[in-house]
Amino acid sequence: MKLIRTLSLVAPLALTLMAPALRAANLPAEGTAAPDFTLSSQEGKSVSLHDFRGQWVVLYFYPKDMTPGCTIEAHNFQADQDKFTAKKTAIVGVSVDTVDSHVQFCTKENLTFKLLADPSHAVVDKYGSFGGVVAARNTFLIDPKGVIRKVYTGVKPNVHSAELLTALDALQK
């Protein structure tokens, strides 16, 4: 009986500690084709990854609308929007929030890039970016042919936009 009680306490802890490694194993790798998907945007329109063929894509997964870190990350992308546009790069955010939540977030924070709703976790799972309750803060830099060129996990919201612009400079030479 004592063994069962101990296992019931240890097993969830072990799974929690192993979860990041298990998710990382499911991340699409650099140099592979980015898995295609279709989700609804804050505009209520269906958006597919293949819609962006011919341009670079910053596909970023983030935990939750209107939270401090996610707001900082979104503000930085918005502030750098012209720099990304000059590099022929679309910014596409994905979370498990609803379309209605994205509408509120974009309205409140004046965001103009696409935020896609994945409440069923289909895409966050495909990209190994589901953190258990919310999306993990991961980013995939995808080239115009649909190939993943860079994978970022556990990104820091304050510096991530600048980090991506630097990577684009190097990759677009």
Image (cartoon, rainbow, N blue to C red):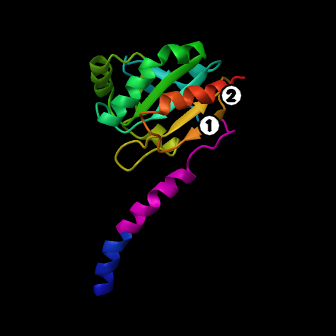
Query: In front: 31, or 161?
Result: 161
Q: Nearer the viewer, mark 1 or mark 2?
A: 2
Q: CA distance from mark 1 to mark 2?
A: 10 Å
In the shown orientation, is residue 116 left or right of residue 59?
left
Image check: 88 left or right of 93?
right
Which residue in the structure is indicated by mark 1?
A: 150
Q: Nearer the viewer, residue 168 or 20?
A: 168
The answer to whether residue 31 is magenta is yes
Quadrant location of the C terminus in the rendered image: top right
- Residue 106 x %, y %: 33, 20
**Quadrant of the frame with the N terminus:** bottom left
Relative depth, front residue between 24 and 48: 24
Res. 114 image quadrant? top left
Q: Is residue 169 magenta?
A: no
Q: Measured along the vertical axis of the image, is residue 132 above or below residue 103?
A: below
Q: Residue at x 39, y 61 (%)?
A: 16
Circle 2 packing at 10 Å, graded few (<14), some (14-19), many (20+), is few
Q: Label 2 amino acid?
A: Leu
Q: Residue at x 59, y 36 (%)?
A: 35
Label the magenta part by its dominant secondary structure: helix
Label 1: few (<14), some (14–19) or many (≥20) C-alpha neighbours in 10 Å: some
Residue 172: where, in percent of width, then height? Answer: 69, 23
Residue sitting at x 33%, y 85%: 3
Tell me residue 70's x, y (percent). 36, 33
- First to last magenta residue range: 12-33
Q: Regarding mark 2 in the picture, which secondary structure is present there?
A: helix
Q: Residue furthest right?
A: 173
Q: Which residue is mark 2?
A: 171
Determine the residue positioned at 40% across, 15% down: 112
Decide: marks 1, 2 in contact (CB < 8 A)?
A: yes
